[in-house]
């Protein structure tokens, strides 16, 4: 690391690394610092005595200087907004804005029926709590509706239970709201010259929107305690994102038109050139939130910072750039050990050759091994491989998407290090030892948009699966790859004018949206998928090399 510590050594211990979690590339000797509060919220350390001889007098575990950064950040976060921190008894939103309308297609069914899911003891306790709290707050009421959608729970990563209303059948009958969500290209145009940023996150999201009273019965859900209908939007209704965006745009339309505020669903970004102007606009935004009984999730808010992450980009005074963490997967590609792996790698890079400087010159030593020649990986090939990886990370131009181009998601789940499943387990174990390390089972995905008849890359994604996820069936891993990709790129893919193309290896994934017996994990995913307008397309693994390589 390059610092101004002079001759002093700097030791970064496990606690520090765990807290800031930098992306470390041991092969290239580089460290990428992603999003950490220290970068966004710098403040001066107290002056130290220049006569102190730390290197001679310090004992093991002595503390030179202690700064309570958390306390400093909390003070900033509650500035002018402590009354907007969400509380358990917060009021429902006032009916001062447009309500959600559940308009059904012509000749839609006048009834919907479903079964009641059995619950274990923990789930029953959570159901009782969910119903009692929402009945008391008025978010749901008892119902005699002819419509009934299933209700069940799924476990979140932290072990807690998440309530799910399965509105798939209702969504099939609902006329889609195509209200456009904002694009990053519009955001970039507005940010020129801005120095100070405040980011606010609305608590309870969709629940802040009322459902039109005569439509509430259509969203009724069935439990073992009876039938209930919501008075506010819940997760899973196909038009929830578009309706919520319209509401936020309507509430803040005058502030948005001034060009100092932008909103994407439940995230508000305020950006100005001067601090005085910034504080003035922040106060106006907070007052508008108060007037509409919209509360904030304090831990997701940032006040008066010089750099922030918003919609997948890092924003500062000088630039708007891609989050380096999102591109880290490019630098992690392992050296090919056989011709097939090299062909896949070159197939990936060739797709983006127009965005890489001197592509043919760089790959010359690699293409020599793709023909009818003996596999000999030498210094020239390794140099070319490393150079191409470097240029892929530095020179690939990630396109800022526009409003009209189609989006394509290519995703893949890799089953890991030794791609020879027919070998005996003992031989696979031996090969892994020879390789020297396990390759984690990962998923990879690429987001592209069609612009001028050419598919251009917008973002890359590569993630390792957890121990639990590694045990999924391959079809569930492939669907998980879709879900993680959509989650990462939701700000691009929700509310698109045209259906998003999702290309996958396994053809039977196209049938996940059709009525059938799904397990709870699959049902949760399918419920989340209804927020997107997409079409699943089958691409054989041999041609899906771009996403496949990111997953290996």
Image (cartoon, rainbow, N blue to C red):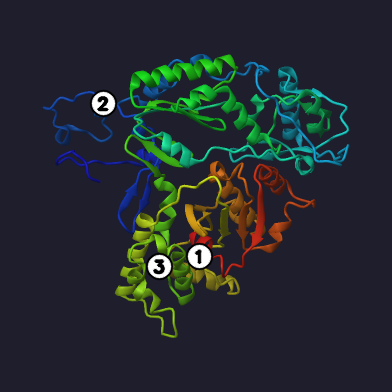
The residue labelled by disc 3 is 335
Q: Closer to the N terminus: mark 3 or mark 1?
A: 3
Position above or below: 476 against 270: below
Position above or below: 458 against 222: below
The residue labelled by disc 2 is 44
Q: Closer to the N terminus: mark 3 or mark 2?
A: 2
Q: Nearer the viewer, residue 11 or 73?
A: 73
Q: Is residue 426 left or right of residue 390?
A: right
The x, y position of residue 477, in whole percent, is 62, 56
What kind of element bears circle 1? Answer: loop
Position above or below: 184 against 439: above
Q: Is residue 433 visible?
A: no
What whole-number distance in Å separates the C-alpha atoms at marks 1 and 2? Answer: 47 Å
The residue labelled by disc 1 is 417
Q: Closer to the N terminus: mark 1 or mark 2?
A: 2
What kind of element bears circle 3? Answer: loop
User: Which quadrant of the view contains residue 331?
Assistant: bottom left
Q: Nearer the viewer, residue 352 or 204?
A: 352
The x, y position of residue 233, in whole percent, is 70, 29
């Amino acid at each position: 690391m390059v610092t101004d510590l002079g001759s002093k050594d700097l030791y970064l211990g496990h606690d520090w690394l765990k807290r800031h979690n930098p992306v470390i590339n041991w092969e290239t000797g580089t460290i990428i610092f992603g999003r950490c509060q220290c970068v966004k919220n710098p403040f001066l350390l107290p002056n130290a005595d220049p006569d102190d001889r730390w290197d001679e007098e310090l004992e093991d575990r002595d503390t030179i200087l202690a700064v309570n950064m958390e306390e400093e950040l909390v003070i900033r976060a509650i500035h002018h907004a402590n009354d907007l921190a969400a509380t358990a008894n917060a009021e429902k939103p006032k009916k001062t804005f447009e309500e959600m309308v559940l308009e059904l297609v012509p000749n839609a069914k006048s009834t919907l029926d479903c079964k009641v899911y059995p619950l274990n003891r923990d789930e029953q306790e959570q159901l009782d709590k969910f119903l009692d709290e929402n009945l008391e707050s008025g978010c749901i009421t008892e119902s005699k509706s002819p419509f009934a959608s299933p209700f069940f729970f799924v476990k979140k990563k932290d072990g807690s239970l998440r309530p799910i209303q399965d509105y798939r059948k209702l969504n099939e009958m609902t006329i889609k709201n195509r209200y456009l969500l904002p694009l990053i290209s519009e955001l970039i145009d507005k940010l020129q010259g801005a120095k100070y940023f405040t980011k606010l996150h609305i608590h309870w999201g969709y629940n802040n929107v009322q459902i039109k009273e005569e439509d509430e019965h259509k969203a009724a859900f069935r439990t073992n305690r009876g039938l209930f209908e919501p008075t506010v939007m819940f997760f899973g209704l196909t038009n929830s994102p578009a309706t919520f965006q319209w509401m936020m745009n309507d509430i803040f339309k005058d502030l948005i038109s001034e060009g100092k505020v932008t909103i994407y669903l439940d995230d508000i970004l305020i950006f100005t050139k001067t601090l005085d102007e910034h504080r003035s606009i922040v106060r106006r935004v907070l007052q508008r939130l108060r007037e509409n009984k919209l509360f904030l999730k304090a831990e997701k808010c940032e006040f008066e910072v010089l750099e922030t992450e918003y919609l997948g980009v890092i924003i500062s005074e000088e630039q708007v750039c891609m989050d380096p963490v999102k591109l880290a997967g490019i630098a992690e590609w392992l050296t090919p050990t056989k011709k097939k792996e090299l062909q896949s790698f070159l197939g990936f890079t060739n797709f983006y050759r127009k965005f890489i400087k001197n592509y043919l010159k760089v790959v010359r030593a690699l293409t020599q091994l793709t023909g009818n020649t003996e596999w000999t990986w030498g210094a020239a090939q390794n140099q070319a491989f490393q150079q191409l990886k470097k240029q892929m990370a530095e020179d690939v131009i990630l396109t800022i998407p526009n409003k009209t181009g189609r989006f394509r998601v290519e995703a893949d789940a890799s089953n890991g290090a030794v791609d020879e499943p027919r070998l005996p387990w003992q031989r696979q174990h031996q090969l892994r030892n020879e390789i020297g390390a396990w390759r984690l089972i990962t998923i990879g995905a690429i987001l592209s948009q069609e612009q001028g008849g050419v598919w251009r890359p917008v973002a890359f994604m590569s993630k390792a699966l957890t121990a639990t996820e590694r045990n999924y069936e391959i079809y569930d891993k492939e669907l998980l790859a879709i879900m993680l990709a959509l989650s990462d790129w939701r700000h691009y893919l929700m509310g698109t004018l045209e259906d998003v193309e999702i290309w996958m290896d396994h053809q039977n994934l196209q049938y996940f949206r059709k009525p059938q017996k799904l397990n709870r994990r699959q049902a949760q995913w399918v419920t989340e998928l209804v927020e997107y307008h997409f079409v699943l397309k089958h691409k054989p693994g041999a041609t899906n090399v771009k996403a496949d390589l990111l997953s290996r």
